[in-house]
Image (cartoon, coloured by chain):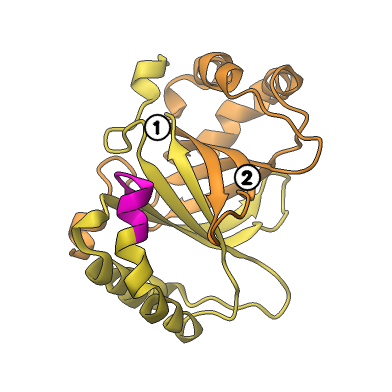
Chain colours: A yellow, B orange
Amino acid sequence: MSREKLKSTFMKKGMIKVSVMYPNGEGKNFDMDYYCSKHIPLVGGLLGDSIKAATVEKGLGGGAPDSPATFAAMGNLYFDSIDSFQSAFGPKSGTIMADLPNFTNIEPVIQISEVLI
Amino acid sequence: MSREKLKSTFMKKGMIKVSVMYPNGEGKNFDMDYYCSKHIPLVGGLLGDSIKAATVEKGLGGGAPDSPATFAAMGNLYFDSIDSFQSAFGPKSGTIMADLPNFTNIEPVIQISEVLI
């Protein structure tokens, strides 16, 4: 498979990906239905057109057979630039974070990345 | 932004995402040029058409200002099913893992997820 073909269609090189990753653990819970049907649309509504794409994944397992997934869930938002993310997210962060207890008791790991491929 | 619009164009609901995440840390190194120009094409060539898409991201920072990125790099491969991934990856895993020392001294965290959005 060529590198050209490996490239996705919407994640352009240079875009900013904001990953919100929810680590699994004893006593941790995560309501995936609420997350997909309420939280993601809430974030989408608050951040508007600054979001270029969003993806959500549910952890199934680790690399070794029968090992647990490190993250129960991962949500990813794509922006044109760090400035675009920060100016959209800053004023809304309180409202977004206040929704977390509605679907999880996990403190997420947040990472900002640059899309290379 | 509607939920429909948030959906990406190539990651279809139900696809399997294999994330290979390289945690940052003291004394850790990661050669992004080699990773993008040699390792990803190597993996693409070995796994062939079972790979439906691949993405690579470089960690820039954490959620808090000036905090480090949890992962130096994340590589993601998309498959139609777990079976498709396992039957493609199993016979080639040795060759793929043997290439890691060529670009990093980090032991990656591997996670298998289901794409929900």
A93 with respect to B104 (left or right):
left
The amino acid beneath tag 2 is Phe
Q: Which residues fall within the magenta stretch? A: A78-86
Element type at mark 2:
strand
Residue B1 in the image: x percent, y percent?
Answer: 18, 63
Residue for point 50% across, 20% down: B44
Residue for point 18% across, 64% down: B2
The amino acid beneath tag 1 is Ala
Residue B68 in the image: x percent, y percent?
Answer: 63, 50
Residue A80: say if magenta.
yes
Quarter where residue A55 is shown: bottom left
Residue for point 50% across, 85% down: A101
Q: Does mark 1 fall on the same chain as mark 2?
A: yes
| Residue that extends furthest to the right in the rendered view of this protein | B27
Which residue corresponds to mark 2?
A: B71
Residue B43 in the image: x percent, y percent?
Answer: 56, 21
Q: Is residue B2 above or below residue B84?
A: below
Residue A59: say if magenta.
no
Q: Chain of mark 2?
A: B
Q: Is residue A3 above or below residue A100?
A: above
How packed mark 2 is, by other alpha carbons closer than 10 Å (few <14, some 14-19, many 20 or more), is: many
Q: Is residue A71 above or below residue A25?
A: above
A114 with respect to A26 (left or right):
left
Residue B23 in the image: x percent, y percent?
Answer: 69, 44
Q: Which mark is residue B108?
A: none
Q: Which mark is residue B53?
A: 1
| Residue that extends furthest to the front in the rendered view of this protein | B66
